[in-house]
Structure formats: C-alpha cells, structure tokens
Image: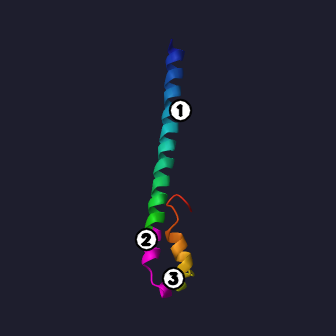
Amino acid sequence: MLSVQILAARTMANWAKRQTKGMERVLTTFATWQKRTAMRREIARMQPHTLRDIGLTPWEAQAEQHKPFWRA
C-alpha cells in the first residue's frame, strides 16, 4: 500500500512540475508579445530622422508597425 502512495505522490509532483513549466512558457510568451507591441508603437511615433538614426527607413518602420504582435 505504501508503494502505491509513493508512486501517486511522485506522479503528482511530476505533473505539478510540468504545469509550472507550461505556465512559465505562457507568461514568457505574453511578455514577449507585450514588448513587441510597445516597441512597434514607439517606432510608429518616431520621426524620419530618428528612424534613420536606428537604421530604418519610413517604409520599413511602417512594415514593422503593421506586423501582428505574434510575429517576430
């Protein structure tokens, strides 16, 4: 009976680890999407001379601005 309890405890511990790692991945993905959205909004507000300073043309900036947040 004890071995069944130990096996059940190990199974639950492994399940909890997988759930935690999965949640970490989800939160990391959401944080990445938020950063991309913020960066693209900032690029959209930049003046052409500022865009040139960071190596972008106005057309490249517009293309970046219109990318969906999930696309790198």
Residue at figure coordinates x 53%, y 85% from the top left: 53
Q: Could you tell me how far apart the alpha carbons at marks 2 and 1 are, in whole angstroms?
A: 41 Å
Q: Image check: 45 left or right of 57?
A: left
What's the magenta bit mostly, secondary-structure-wise?
helix
Question: In terms of secondary structure, where does tag 2 sit?
Answer: helix
Question: In terms of secondary structure, where does tag 1 sit?
Answer: helix
Residue at figure coordinates x 56%, y 76% from the top left: 60
Above or below residue 55? Residue 23 is above
Look at mark 1 in the image and give the residue it sits on. Answer: 14
Residue 48 included in the magenta stretch of the image: yes
Find the magenta span and give its range: 39-50
Q: Could you tell me how far apart the alpha carbons at marks 1 and 3 are, in whole angstroms?
A: 49 Å
Above or below residue 8? Residue 36 is below
Q: Residue furthest top?
A: 1
Total of numbered circles in the picture? 3
Specify the amino acid type for callout 2.
Answer: Arg
Mark 2 or mark 1, which has the lower sequence index? 1
Look at mark 3 in the image and give the residue it sits on. Answer: 51
Specify the amino acid type for callout 3.
Answer: Leu
Residue 55, given in percent of the width and then of the height, sits at 57, 81
Which quadrant: the C terminus?
bottom right
Mark 2 or mark 3, which has the lower sequence index? 2
- Closer to the camera, 8 or 46? 46
Colour scheme in use: rainbow
Residue 40 included in the magenta stretch of the image: yes
Specify the amino acid type for callout 1.
Answer: Asn
Q: Could you tell me how far apart the alpha carbons at marks 2 and 3 are, in whole angstroms?
A: 13 Å
Residue at figure coordinates x 50%, y 22% from the top left: 8
Look at mark 2 in the image and give the residue it sits on. Answer: 41
Above or below residue 24? Residue 71 is below
Mark 1 or mark 3, which has the lower sequence index? 1
